[in-house]
Image (cartoon, rainbow, N blue to C red):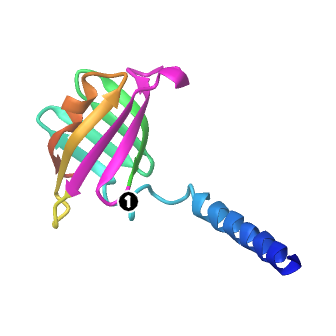
Amino acid sequence: MKKARSFLLAAGIMLAMAFTFSCSSDDSKSSGPDGSLDGTWQKSSNTLEIEGGRATITYSEVVEGAIDYGTSSGSFRMEKMNSGDIPKDNQPIATFNYELSDDKETLTISDATATGDDDLPGVLNGQWTKAID
């Protein structure tokens, strides 16, 4: 019984350590696997600027917020609209899927949905082209 208790205690500690390390973040890194979406993207008259974990989307409005993405999907939390802060409990959140072309010149966003903003999915969905700096 004593061995089982020791084993369970050790297993619990190891599990807690694994969870702690998997949840820790390094804010100095770009979001995404390698910051591959960083840059300025254009779709008709809309602009999407991504740098690290921040994004600005310019359409009929100018919205700013936090962006996070993995290898094929991501989310955007709208924190400001037209330079005015949006209260934290009312910040729209958009989720999306994306595909980056092999030459990294075309970003296709699809299946965007948003809570709290009806326009954002239509703005995000579609083919974005890397802007020339």
| Residue 108 position within the rendered picture, expressed as x and y whole percent measured from the top left | 17, 49
Seen in the image, is 120 located left or right of residue 21?
Answer: left
| Residue 19 position within the rendered picture, expressed as x and y whole percent measured from the top left | 63, 62
For the question of whether residue 21 can be seen, the reply is: yes
Residue 96 counted in the magenta span: yes
Q: Residue furthest right?
A: 2
For label 1, the residue is: 35
Residue in the foreground of this view, choosing between 121 and 129: 121
Residue at 20% across, 62% down: 104
Location of the N terminus by quadrant is bottom right
Task: Residue 82: name its quadrant.
Answer: top left
For the question of whether residue 130 can be seen, the reply is: no
15 vs 95: above or below: below
Q: Amino acid at mark 1?
A: Gly
Seen in the image, is 15 located left or right of residue 9?
Answer: left
Q: Which residues are magenta?
A: 70-99
Residue in the foreground of this view, choosing between 93 and 40: 93
Count of marks overlaid on the render: 1
Residue at 22% across, 46% down: 41
Other residues around mark 1 within 10 Å, as few (<14) / some (14–19) / many (≥20): some
| Residue 34 position within the rendered picture, expressed as x and y whole percent measured from the top left | 38, 64
Residue at 28% across, 34% down: 113
Judged by its main secondary structure, the magenta piece is strand
94 vs 118: above or below: below
Seen in the image, is 62 located left or right of residue 5?
Answer: left
Q: Secondary structure at mark 1?
A: loop
